[in-house]
Image (spheres, grey):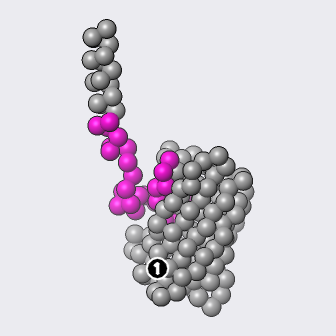
Amino acid sequence: MKRSLTGSAIAVALALAASPAFAHDDAYLDTLEAPHGGQLRMAGPWHYELVTASDAEASGDSPLVVYVTDHAGAPVSTAGATGTATILSGKVTSTAALTPDGGNRMKGVSRHARTPGAKIVVSITLPGKAPGQARFTPGSAAAHPMPMQTGRAQ
């Protein structure tokens, strides 16, 4: 009995000690090339990849697409999900409703400018799950600026 308790305690201690090694912070995610040219962030048990139009202007509607995957990069279905994107660009704040767009995509439209200091907060609630939230800086050097891919993912 004592041996199994000691073994269990060691197993728990090792699991807890190893947990930080599996964490993906923003700096690490910024070193990865995102599959759709966007910026990757962790949101609880998921990764979100935010793709914005590189030429977004406050005077016109600009699309936002968020791809949801698990930590291994496998697509997570967004069927039945709800979400929002709050865009903070200078002194202007705008919000876009995100709706399922097939597969693991959420899509919305907002009037916002893609500026170096812009921040976008994405919140998505998958059916039966707690909301996940991530903060993005799409105008930063770490955000792999690329043109918006408007076609559906393969």
Please provide percent x and percent y for residue 91.
47, 88
Mark 1: secondary structure = loop
* Residue 68, position as x, y percentages in the image: 58, 55
From this viewpoint, is residue 33 visible? yes
Please indicate whether residue 11 sits to the left or right of residue 43 in the image.
left
Residue marked by disc 1: 118
Query: Can residue 144 be seen?
Result: no
Residue 32 vs residue 9, the one in the foreground: 9
Q: In which quarter of the image is the N terminus?
A: top left
Rendered position, 70 above or below 12? below
Where is residue 51? Give x, y as percent.
Answer: 56, 68
Task: Residue at the far top: name it.
Answer: 1
Q: Identify the residue shown where x is 41% and y is 75%.
A: 140
Residue 98, quarter of picture: bottom right
Q: In the rendered image, which quarter contains the C terminus?
A: bottom right
Picture layout, residue 112 above or below residue 154: below
Residue stretch rendered in magenta on the structure: 16-45
Tell me the kind of residue under disc 1. Ala
Q: Where is residue 136 in the image (x, y as percent from the top left)?
A: 47, 68
Residue name at image x 56 percent, y 62 percent = 123
